[in-house]
């Protein structure tokens, strides 16, 4: 019997699916987005680790003020070379719960929201992040960056380091940065030799250093300094200075 010579017809191939227009562009954009995000995170972590061991030679705000006024006074000194009462005074003035929070004082933020206020809840940790890394001025972008960066600094830095940097980069007068320069500027002494009253007056001018004077204080500044003096003594007694070794 002769074999059939009829060939089986091959099934027609389905046409390959065409890539949707723009798909490759979207994928590239997504990859670049994540590269930028991861790069930004790496920079932030790197800068935070760097300043955990290296003292900042300047800050963005110092640089800005230096260009505006011509020069700035800035002398970095270790916390051990600053009168312990000065450390306690700024904590009493700016952030009484400094040793108790992780960078953001949630209770203070909640109280501020309930009062309907717009300020007064920034911790020393938040202020040092702003002063060391960011720009000044009211901006939601800056506040959001500050709020995200602050817990990272608390994770990497010690409370001792946070306070040390804060005292060294805070502005105490126009072009005067850090407690050593401020002590010389206002009282002609070194930061290690500040008295309790002098320390309280320096802490009292911090919210508005360009309009207040530590050496020629107004009545309002004197009253605030007296309150800070009491607060610093209380912090020493109740143990809230333990985290930064304030004596």
Image (spheres, rainbow, N blue to C red):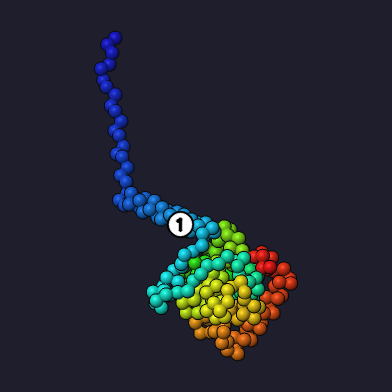
When the figure is inspected, residue 33 is found, relative to residue 102, above or below; the finding is above
In front of the other: 49 or 119: 49
Residue plotted at (62% across, 76% down): 194
Residue plotted at (60% across, 67% down): 81
When the figure is inspected, residue 209 is found, relative to residue 47, above or below; the finding is below
Query: Horizontal placement of 144 versus 246: left or right?
Result: left
Q: Residue furthest left?
A: 5
In front of the other: 55 or 29: 55
Q: Which quarter shows the C terminus?
A: bottom right
What residue would you read off at disc 1? 43
- Give how far across and how far down residue 107 sits, in percent: 64, 71
In front of the other: 18 or 117: 117
Q: Which quarter shows the N terminus?
A: top left
Asked whether residue 29 is in view, the answer is: yes
Q: Residue furthest bottom?
A: 219
When the figure is inspected, residue 22 is found, relative to residue 187, above or below; the finding is above
- Give how far across and how far down residue 209 sits, in percent: 52, 80
- Give how far across and how far down residue 117 sits, in percent: 56, 79
Residue plotted at (32% across, 42% down): 17
Quadrant position of residue 116: bottom right
């Amino acid at each position: 019997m002769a074999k059939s010579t009829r060939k089986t017809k091959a099934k027609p191939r389905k046409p390959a699916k065409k890539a949707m227009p723009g798909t490759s562009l979207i994928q590239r954009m997504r990859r670049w987005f994540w590269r930028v995000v991861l790069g930004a995170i790496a920079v932030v972590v790197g800068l935070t680790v760097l300043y955990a061991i290296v003292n900042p030679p300047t800050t963005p705000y110092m640089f800005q003020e230096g260009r505006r006024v011509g020069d700035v006074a800035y002398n970095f000194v270790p916390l051990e070379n600053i009168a312990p009462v000065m450390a306690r005074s700024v904590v009493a003035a700016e952030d009484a719960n400094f040793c108790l929070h992780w960078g953001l004082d949630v209770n203070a933020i909640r109280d501020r929201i309930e009062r309907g206020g717009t300020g007064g809840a920034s911790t020393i940790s938040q202020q040092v992040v702003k002063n060391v890394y960011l720009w000044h001025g009211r901006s939601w972008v800056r506040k959001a960056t500050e709020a995200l960066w602050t817990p990272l600094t608390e994770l990497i830095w010690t409370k001792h380091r946070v306070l040390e940097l804060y005292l060294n980069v805070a502005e105490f007068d126009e072009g005067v940065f850090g407690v050593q320069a401020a002590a010389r500027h206002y009282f002609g002494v070194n930061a290690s030799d500040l008295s309790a009253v002098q320390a309280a007056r320096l802490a009292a001018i911090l919210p508005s250093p360009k309009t207040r004077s530590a050496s020629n204080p107004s009545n309002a500044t004197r009253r605030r300094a007296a309150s800070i003096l009491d607060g610093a003594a209380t912090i020493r007694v109740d143990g809230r200075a333990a985290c930064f070794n304030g004596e």
